[in-house]
Amino acid sequence: MLNRSLSSYIDIAQSFYGQACDMCQEGRSINLLRLINVWGGALAECLLDYDAPEKAAEDCLAEIGITITPDVWMAPSPRSASACEIDIELGRTLSRLYLGEGIEWSFVARNAFTEVGRGLRQIAGADDACDALMAESLRMAVRYELGAHGICDRTIDVKISGQRWSVADCILALSALAGSHQARLMMDAGISNHASLEKALDDLMRVMMEEAVRHGVPGEVNLLHGIPANDTKSSIHADLIRSIEPLALTVLEELHVLDRTNQAIALAKAAGRMVAVAAAGEAPDIEHVVARPLALTAMMGGFRAAV
């Protein structure tokens, strides 16, 4: 029998909404765009316990009243992919406060956050732009997790088990690919300002290292610990990039992650997950003080070779 706090999804909805608003408070107002991303991450965290998280996400959107699909119309995001990812992960972390052992917890929290979604939609105006932003937030929160997990699983199966790569090779390949992918899309968009390029690289390294820490890599040092000095030559790993790119992008395309900016974030998260595969736990294959600079240097090398 579920306890009283678990059975009352309205109480969970109210509690979550209050905490999420506190997170997104800016001055005297709430940043609604951030709140939508926090909500998307929170609901996605519940749905990851389901057998088919993407279908479960579409079911939730339909219950809220959102039926818009990216094929029909999609609003341009007013925030960067890396900024959205930060708030999605905040939402996932907040969601865990309401989850316990067993699918019944996920079901009740799912109903609570769906109810919050109905309220958000009304507050935001319930128009096509609002619907597109809410759908994108929830879909990407689910797909980021499925993408990182899927890329790592397929890399282990194909590259380590099949082609005898080492786990260090996998870290180098995925990290360098993420950096190269981000740089290439910026070059294609005509973005060559040094400050913009460096910020994009810093954001991507943060995504990778935070993902590694979330999955068990010791976090007692700075997230970007181990970056070499500016006068140190970065490795490019072009052969590894060419080998891993079709595998990784196929996983993302299967999940309908087609926007190149979102792909770069997903690749960085996969690289961070691979760092955790190597460096987390009591008996890691590679010590984290080695795995961190390995990944960071490869990402920097891949990025700077492409600009």
Image (cartoon, rainbow, N blue to C red):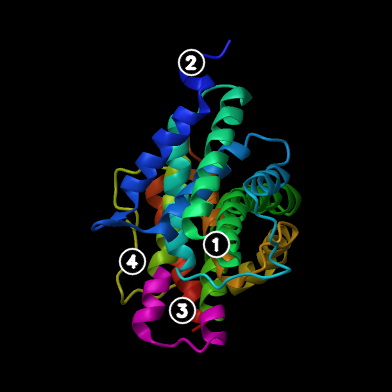
The local secondary structure at tag 2 comes to helix
Query: Which three-letter amino acid code belongs to the residue tagged 2?
Result: Arg
The answer to whether residue 190 is magenta is: yes
Query: Which three-letter amino acid code belongs to the residue tagged 3?
Result: Arg
Residue 126, can we see it?
yes
Residue 296, can we see it?
no
Apparent side of residue 245 relative to residue 213 in the rendered image (left or right): right
Can you tell which of label 1 and label 3 is closer to the viewer?
1
Can you tell which of label 2 and label 4 is closer to the viewer?
2
> Mark 3 vs mark 4: which is more N-terminal?
4
The local secondary structure at tag 1 comes to helix
> Mark 1 vs mark 4: which is more N-terminal?
1
> Mark 2 vs mark 4: which is more N-terminal?
2
- Going 34% across and 63% down the picture, which residue do you hit? 227
Q: Residues within 10 Å of mark 1 (few under 14, many from 20)?
A: many
Query: Which three-letter amino acid code belongs to the residue tagged 4?
Result: Pro
Which residue is disc 1 drawn over? 130
User: Which label was assigned to residue 304?
Assistant: 3
> Mark 1 vs mark 2: which is more N-terminal?
2
x and y percent of residue 18 in the render?
36, 40
x and y percent of residue 30 in the render?
34, 55
- Going 72% across and 63% down the picture, which residue do you hit? 253
Which residue is disc 2 drawn over? 4
Which residue is disc 4 drawn over? 228
- Going 72% across and 66% down the picture, which residue do you hit? 246
